[in-house]
Amino acid sequence: MTIPVFDGHNDFLLRMSAHPQRDKLWLEGDGKGQLDLPRMRAGGFVGGFFAIYIPSPRADMPALDMDAMLTSPSYTMPLPPPLELDYAQAIAVQQAGHLLAMERLAPGDFSIIRSTTDLHAALSAGRIAGIMHMEGAEAIDTDLDALYAFHAMGLRSLGPVWSRPTAFGHGVPFAYPSTPDTGPGLTDAGKRLVKACNDLKIMLDLSHLNEAGFNDVATLSNAPLVATHSNAHAVTPSARNLTDRQLGMIRDSGGMVGLNYATAFLGTGSRAGVGWEQMLRHLDHLISVLGEDHIGLGSDFDGAQVPDVLSDVAGMPAFFDQMRQHGYDAALIEKISHKNWLGLLERTWGA
């Protein structure tokens, strides 16, 4: 029996936005990338967070040399500059439209989820449950009018930053070795954003937020703390990974961390040849600090280079086989694969 997969983060909408045959990409695939409907079905993917992500204009974006990130003993990629609101909103609306189109094209296979009632209805009917997420709030104005508009479209999860500054806070750079303590905390607008998201039951994602901003959200928010796609800093000291102190705060809030499959955040030393061993090492550490009820999956599919042994979403059954061989029992694997995410959404959105 295929184990259900509920995933904390993917960038399929970004891949769709650059594809000349978007409908075909979704329904049939193109033999590339890591996600499409047939491979989701093959891998047991039953739901997850679909990110609206605004790429920086090419002239503003420093080249991310992934080969260098995987083989260099250290690196620091400078943060791109903030984005213009009009530019960000146009792309965000386009990608929200892609998600809406996915539901229209495959209504028997896919539903956009706005509540736990929707979530359980989709899962019971065998439809993939898609949550509209925004990775970086560049498309939200500081008056927060756009937040309410996107909420009406289906937005139920928001990261105040990607790895660049916004009007709301500061992201961590891609840096190794580095702590996540890389800059100031939330702005006044960011503090208003936290309150508004709490009021609307929009989940706040802390994955790209620096440590000072993380601390501010922890102080201000009345919801569980969540990092949808992050790993353990104690295992791999990347700025993108979470310290044990942060993990303890997430645990104590009733929150969640989704394991990120990106090789650059999994490995140590050269970070080349990353495979099952490194993925399981991070899981072991996350479980040791968070406990078994606060850990899930946050693949970063279609947004990162993942280990070759996994390749794409159709490789998830092999990952679960590795967990079994590593000594995880069936109950723990079910928690990691999907049950903990379902519980987190009920705690955040209400039953």
Image (cartoon, rainbow, N blue to C red):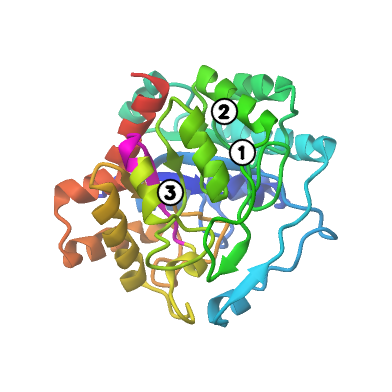
Q: Which labelled disc corresponds to residue 194?
A: 2
35 up-or-down from 194: above or below: below
Please rate how many residues cluster around mark 1, counting C-alpha atoms within 10 Å: few if below 14, some from 14 to 19, many from 20: many
Where's residue 344, x and y in %? 35, 33
Q: In this view, does 177 lie above or below 119?
A: below
Label 1, on which residue? 160
Place of residue 274 in the rendered image (x, y in percent of width and height, measured from the top left): 42, 75
In the picture provided, is 307 more to the left or to the right than 87? left
> Which image quadrant for residue 65?
bottom right
Q: Is residue 119 left or right of residue 31?
A: left
The answer to the question of whether label 1 and label 2 lie on touching residues, with beta carbons closer than 8 A, is yes
The circle drawn on residue 174 is none
Which residue is at 64% across, 32% downward?
Answer: 190
329 shown above or below 145: below
Element type at mark 3: helix
Residue 176: x, y in percent? Answer: 55, 70
Q: Which of marks 3 and 2 is nearer the N terminus?
A: 3
Element type where label 2 sits in the image: helix
Specify whether residue 304 is painted magenta: no
- Res 161 quadrant in image: top right
Residue at numbered disc 3? 40
Q: What element carries label 1?
A: loop
Task: Specify which label sits upstream in the sequence, 1 or 2.
Answer: 1
Distance CA(mark 3)–CA(mark 2): 33 Å
Q: Which of 147 and 2 is in front in this view?
A: 147
Region rendered in magenta = 251-261
Is 316 or 247 nearer to us in this picture?
247
